[in-house]
Image (cartoon, grey):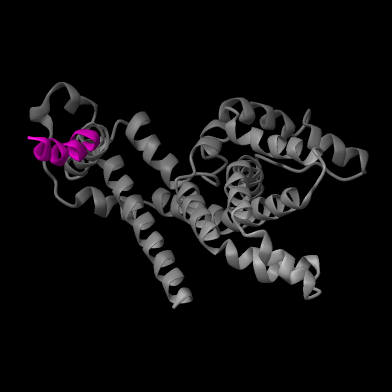
Amino acid sequence: MKGSSQKLAPYLFIGPSIILLTLFSLLPILLALVISFTDMDLSGLVNYESIRFIGLENYTNVLLDPSFIKSLGNTLFFVIIGVPLVLIFSLSIAILINMGKSRAFKVFRVVFYLPSVTNVVAVAVVWSYLYNPTLGLFNYVLGQMNLGPVPWLTDPTVAKISLIVLAVWRGIGLNMIIFIAAIKGIPGSYYEAAQLDGANTWQQIRYITLPQLRYAIFFVSITTMIGWLQFFEEPFVMTKGKPLDGTLTASLFIYNNGFQFSKFGYAAAGSFILFFAIIAVTLIQFRLQNKAES
C-alpha cells in the first residue's frame, strides 16, 4: 500500500500543472492550428456552419501578402539591431556593477532594473512626449545645440531606431540581473589566481568572466531573440505600425488581421508561420552553440 502511494505521488504533484498546461497552452495552440486551415471570421463565432475548410490557402495568401513580407523585414531589422545591443549593454552594466564596491552600485542595480517592471503603456506615453517633434525634450536639446529637429516617429527608418532605443532601455534590467547572478557563481579563487599571475582587470574579464558566462550569454541571447521576434508592445502603443508600415512587425500584423479585421483564420496562419520561424532560428542557435562547444 505504501509502495503504491509513493508511485502515485509524482503524478499527483505534476498532475495539476499538466492539466493547466493542456487547457491554457496546448489546447489553444491546437485550436489555432485548426482555425488556420479555415476561413473563420467574425460571423464564424456566431454560426459555426459558415466556417469553411480551405486547406493551405491562408498560408499561401499570407506568404504572398506584401504587408506580411514587409513586417518580416521590419522584425528582422529589430532583431539584428536590438538583440546585440541588449546583450552588450546588459552584460557590460552587470560586470561594471559587480566590480563596484560602493553601496551606490546597489542603487544603480535598482535604477537599471526599474524599466523592466514598469508598465509599457506608461513608459510609451512618456517616451512619446520625449519624441514629440515640436514639444519633445530630444528635439529641444538638439535645438539648443543649433541642430535641426529629428523626425523620431514620422520617418520609417528613424521610427524603427526610436523604438529600438526604447526597447533596449526596457530590456536591459532583466538580463542584467541574470548576468549578475551568473557572475556571483564564478569562484573567487579564479580571480585570485589570475591576480597572482599579474592579470589586469580587462584580462580577468576576457579570460575568466566571459568564458564562465557562456551558458548565461547563450540563455539570454535565446530568450532575447525570441522576445524581439515577437516585438509587439512598443510599436502597438507608440506607432501602430506607422509610418508607411515602417514599424509594422509580424506580431502586429497578426494582431491587426485577427482583432481589427476579424480574419481569424488568416491571422492564425500568420502566427504559425512566425511560430515555425522562431523554432527554426532557435534550433540554429542551439546547433551553433553545440558546434562551438565541440
User: Quarter-wise, where is residue 169 in the image?
Assistant: top right
Q: Can residue 203 be seen from the camera position used here?
A: no
Q: Measured from the top left, where is residue 165 in percent x and y?
A: 66, 45
Query: Residue at position x 17%, y 45% from top?
Result: 37
Image quadrant occupied by the C terminus? bottom left
Residue 22 placement, left or right of 145: left
Name the residue at the front extreme. Answer: 2
* Magenta-drawn stretch, dominant element (helix, strand or loop): helix
Q: Quarter of the image for the N terminus: give it.
A: top left
Q: Is residue 10 magenta?
A: yes
Q: Which residue is rendered at x = 68% and y = 27% of the image? A: 126
The location of residue 181, given as percent across then percent down, is 59, 48
Q: In this view, does 252 lie to the left or right of 65?
A: right
* Residue found farthest to the bottom: 294
* Magenta residues, start to end: 1-14
In this rendered view, identify the residue nearer to me: 29 or 158: 29
Whether 136 is drawn above or below 87: the answer is: above
The quadrant holding residue 2 is: top left
